Image (spheres, rainbow, N blue to C red):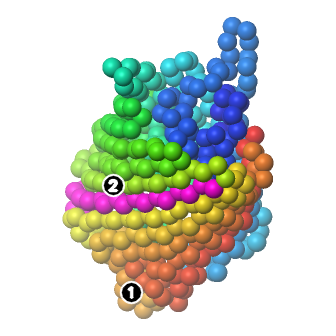
Amino acid sequence: MYALPSFARQTGQRCAACHVGGNWPQLTPWGRFFKLAGYTAGRSFADKEGFNYVPLGILGQVGVNWAAQPNDSQGNPVVTQNGAPEAYGFTGEVGTKITDFAGIFYEYGIGNTFPGWKGAAGPIDIRAVHFFHPGNSELLVGIDSNNDPTVQDVWNTIPSWSFPAYAAPQAPGGPGGPMISSLGQQVGSVGVYALFDREFYVELSEYRVGTGFYRWMTAGTNFQNGAEYLKGFNPYWRAYWTKERGPNVWMAGAFGMHSNIYPDSSSPSGPTDTFSDTGFDTQYQHLGDTRKLTLRGSYIYEQQSWNASYPLGNVSNPKDNFKTLNLNGAYSIGDGWTFSGGYFFGNGSSESALYAVTDPTGTQLSAKPNTTGYVLEVDRTLTQNLLATVQYTGFTKFNGLTSNIDGIGRKPSDNNTLWITLFFAF
């Protein structure tokens, strides 16, 4: 999920050419176009004269965490202790131009936390493109295949690349979330997209479960134990308008996905639950010579129809809904410092089978997933290959509660986490 060293070698450019202030992963206009154009700018890694560069890279993180009470959202002690150094997220990447019309971005990670050493596929994006020139206009048409809805997107507003792009291992997420953000490394896709005059973009993709032909995209995913198992082909769509004027860039867009998912991944047959996600997003950037400002926002509304799970008694209601809002911004000084902050909330239907919180006497305290909080982050680009981050995640409401969030007296702020980490990319 970070800047790819192989792309820097391919293009001969610094990371700051594609990433705002050199801060991974938020993209500049050139970084967005480089991705949409199939990662084809620059040299091929090999030609008739030999090898030009190594299309490989190694990414990773080392860091420390502190939590108010180092427990997960259920009140259970976490594996590591406050202040214990950790190494995690070691990833090998392949990113390269294949031909003048195609390119690939592929990551494979080892271990969630040291010494886990479990291998699994990371984000994958493969593209083939062609440029047309009707009249005085430019039309870019592409074919894309990936393993995570929205990972192909070029804006830092929707799930795969939204702020915060990375989070502390101890920082819990909310108890609920939209399905569109829960399918990474569990699916495979094929889709088509078009960009007209670098302003108007449309895309239609179809996703299916990452088995069979797509199994190489989901290596390390256990479909017999908890992974989401999609039935048939599931459509994803995306559209946006963007405009550049001098150092200013505006974008307004919409996106969505309809998913059919078996309630038991170990027995993928019979009726399915359906999830219909509709989202809206916007972004503004001011890219001055030394000062850069980015403002972002996204909203997702999900309709949940428990056609399979409700008859089985797995949920309390035949239909539910879930909503998320993410508002954030970043301010960069040169290619060295970036200061970011964001507010998030998720809320949805009361659903005791999924979100119930009870006290020790069995009295239900909440059955809602409603969670609100904020993230504050400072990033320092030490070199092109090293990024230091200090991040604080705070909660003001958790699981619909502002106190006693697990029935044993913990407050939302007991999930607050301070994370100091160093990213490297070589």
Residue 397 picture location, percent across and down: 46, 80
To which residue does mark 2 refer? Answer: 279
Task: Where is residue 366? Give x, y as percent.
Answer: 37, 82
Residue 302 within the segment the image draws in magenta: yes
Q: Is residue 419 above or below residue 200?
A: below
Label 1 or label 2, whichever comes before in sequence order = 2
With 323 as the anchor, is 389 left or right in this view?
right
Q: Position of residue 382 (x, y in %)?
A: 78, 53
Q: Which residue is mark 1?
A: 365
Q: Which residues are magenta?
A: 291-312
Say the numbered circle drawn on residue 208: none
Rendered residue at 46%/43% (across/down): 244
**Within 10 Å of the Cα at label 2, are there few (<14), some (14-19), or many (20+) other Cα atoms?**
many
Spot occupied by residue 354 in the image (x, y as percentages of width and height):
36, 70
> Does residue 29 show up magenta in the picture?
no
* Residue in the image at 38% along x and 20% along y: 133
Closest to the observer, 254 or 179: 254
Label 2 amino acid?
Answer: Gly
Extreme residue toward the bottom, this view: 361
- The amino acid pointed to by label 1 is Leu
